[in-house]
Image: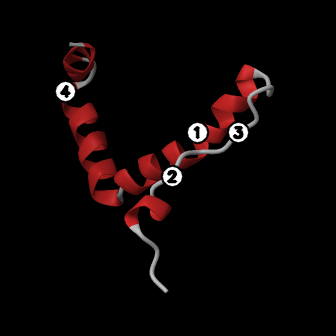
Amino acid sequence: MRKSLEEINGTVAYHRDAPSWKKVFFFLGPGALVAVGYMDPGNWMTSMAGGAQYGYILLSVILI
């Protein structure tokens, strides 16, 4: 039996009385998975080559 879209998309369950630092960890896990999936070897090498060629000039683009 296939799940509906409403059943697939959900929220992260956490205890409301948990300390705030502990609540952050519930959201860091899925965020880390997405970040690792985005930084594939091609993006990694492009970022390294750009940083080696332009140095700290690229940092101003990120800050803008």
Element class at badge 1: helix
Mark nearer the viewer, 2 or 1: 2
Which is nearer the N-term, disc 3 or disc 1?
Answer: 3
Which residue is denoted by mark 4 in the rendering? 54
Which residue is denoted by mark 2 in the rendering? 10
Which residue is denoted by mark 1 in the rendering? 28
Mark nearer the viewer, 4 or 1: 1
Q: Are marks 2 and 4 in contact (CB under 8 Å)?
A: no
- Asked where in the image residue 12 lies, by quadrant, the reply is top right
Q: Are marks 3 and 4 in contact (CB under 8 Å)?
A: no
Q: Are marks 2 and 1 in contact (CB under 8 Å)?
A: no
Rendered residue at 45%/56% (across/down) = 9
Element class at badge 3: loop
Mark nearer the viewer, 3 or 1: 3
Badge 4, how many Cα within 10 Å: few under 14, some, many 20+?
few
Element class at badge 4: helix
Q: Which residue type carries mark 1?
A: Leu
Q: CA distance from mark 3 to mark 2?
A: 12 Å
Which is nearer the N-term, disc 4 or disc 1?
Answer: 1
Q: Which residue type carries mark 4?
A: Tyr
Mark nearer the viewer, 3 or 4: 3
Q: CA distance from mark 2 to mark 1?
A: 16 Å
Give the colouring mode of the picture: secondary structure
Element class at badge 2: loop
Which residue is denoted by mark 3 in the rendering? 14
